[in-house]
Amino acid sequence: MSLTPKQRADKKYRETHREQRALQNKEWASNNKDKTRIYGLNWYYRNLDSIKLQRKERLKQMKLIVVKHYNPLMKCVCCGEDKIEFLTLDHIEGGGNKLKAKLKTFGSDYYRWLINNNFPHKLRVLCMNCNWAIGKYGYCPHNNEELEGR
């Protein structure tokens, strides 16, 4: 579809006056905060389904990156579970909840923090069951012995 002469002129104007228009838009937004908020909220609610899907996909991608880093085989080091939905990170020396509270990061924020900070800390990949049992009892029933580091 080709542009009309007016559309071409408008496009050329926008391209040549980009910085000026950005300043005008910023000034308008600061003078019309209520309208800006309403426009933003309307856009957000119109696109909520799409936003939720994007967030879910980003979380899945970050989890894959983090799990692959800490265990390239992407398996629980205790029982061998390999379904990504069941895998989680375990702090080998304990204290994971305290660290997350200190950093004020949970879920996808924690994955993002790990990625941005070059995967620090001694972590390992466990399934949810093994992680919970080790945290609660100090061992996992799969092997009835304490895993190293606890």
Image (spheres, helix red, strand yellow):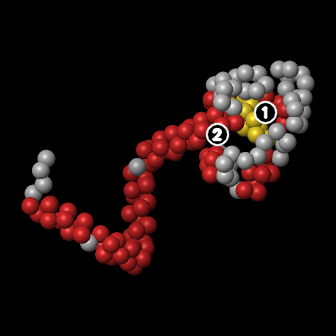
- Vertical order, 46 against 140 (above or below): below
Residue 23: where, in percent of width, then height? 36, 76
Q: Residue 66 carries which label?
A: 2
Dot 2 crowding, Cα within 10 Å, few <14, some 14–19, many 20+: many
| Residue at the image point whose x is 33% and y is 72% from the top | 19
Q: Quadrant of residue 29?
A: bottom left
**Mark 2 vs mark 1: in front:** 2
Please state if 72 lies on the left or on the right of 148 as rendered.
left
Q: Quadrant of residue 6?
A: bottom left
Question: Which residue extends farthest left?
Answer: 5
* Among the two numbered marks 2 and 1 on one chain, the one whose residue lies closer to the N terminus: 2
Judge by depth and name the residue closer to the eye, 149 or 137: 149
- What element does badge 2 sit on? helix
| Residue at the image point whose x is 63% and y is 47% from the top | 115
| Residue at the image point whose x is 90% and y is 24% from the top | 145
- Vertical order, 123 against 9 (above or below): above
Q: Residue 131 carries which label?
A: 1
